[in-house]
């Protein structure tokens, strides 16, 4: 029911969602970019529903105030203290060991503002948890989104990140000047 409703809403807005995590992959870090607007969350959450994936996502703890906090948790939000928790990647990667199925969404830009250098936490988490990285996207010019590619981190960040960057080049953000790969 919700899947059909989410598809209808996205279709009404002109969005097409395609691709997914391959059959048999029960755990992965889902990188989603570009992230330049709060609308990314709305469209992305609806896309997860269309794809039939249970959404879990990291979001800064400052958003978890009443009444928004309980709503965010019910939608799959996991609060993160980005300023003081130096062991966040370790703690988050441990979530994968405790769960049978987990699709954890991370926006590597770490902000909706322009960021010349993506954060590496998503890669560290995937490597420590021994899970693949699914590359999700929202292209506002084409009004297309979904998951198109999955990579298995090798431990060679530079080489793996080159693949990730190449994937996201040419994908159009809602606010292109805030996306460093435009």
Image (spheres, grey):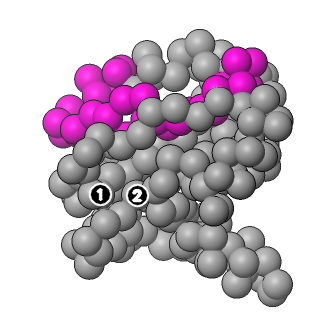
Please determine whether, in this image, residue 43 is positioned above or below residue 2: above
Pinpoint residue 5: horizontal percent, then vertical percent: 71, 54
Residue 87 drawn at (x, y percent): 38, 70
- Pick out the residue farthest to the top: 170
Q: Secondary structure at mark 1?
A: strand
Quarter of image, res 60: bottom right
- Please identify the quadrant where the N terminus is shown: bottom right
Q: Tell me which label, 1 or 2, sits earlier in the chain.
A: 1
Q: Residue at x 68, y 73 (%)?
A: 72
Give the camera-side residue of 56 and 36: 56
Question: Looking at the image, can residue 4 be seen?
Answer: yes
- Give the side of residue 122 with respect to residue 18, left or right: left
The C terminus: image quadrant: top right
**Residue 82 visible in the snapshot:** no
Contact? badges 1 and 2 (CB < 8 Å): yes
The magenta segment is: 134-163
- Circle 2 residue: 103
Q: Quadrant of residue 180?
A: top right
Question: Mark 1: few, some, or many residues within 10 Å (few <14, many ≥20)?
Answer: many
Residue at the image point whose x is 48% and y is 73% from the top: 85
Name the disc covering residue 27, or none.
1
Instruction: Please give the name of the residue rendered at 70% of the width and 18% of the height, measured from the top-left corner.
Output: 142
Query: What label sits on residue 47 in the rendered view?
Result: none
């Amino acid at each position: 029911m919700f899947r059909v409703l989410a598809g209808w809403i996205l279709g009404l807005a002109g969005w097409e969602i395609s691709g997914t995590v391959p059959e048999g992959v029960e755990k992965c870090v889902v990188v989603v970019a570009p992230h330049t607007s709060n609308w990314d969350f709305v469209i992305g959450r609806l896309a997860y529903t269309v794809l039939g994936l249970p959404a879990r996502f990291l979001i800064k703890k400052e958003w978890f105030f009443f009444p928004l906090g309980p709503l965010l948790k019910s939608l799959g939000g996991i609060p993160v203290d980005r300023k003081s928790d130096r062991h966040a990647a370790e703690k988050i990667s441990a979530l994968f060991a405790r769960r049978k199925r987990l699709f954890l969404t991370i926006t590597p830009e770490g902000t909706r503002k322009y960021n010349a250098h993506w954060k590496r936490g998503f890669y560290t988490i995937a490597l420590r948890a021994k899970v693949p990285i699914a590359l999700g996207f929202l292209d506002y010019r084409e009004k297309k989104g979904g998951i198109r590619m999955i990579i298995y981190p090798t431990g060679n960040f530079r080489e793996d990140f080159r693949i990730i960057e190449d994937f996201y080049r040419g994908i159009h953000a809602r606010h292109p000047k805030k996306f460093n790969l435009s």
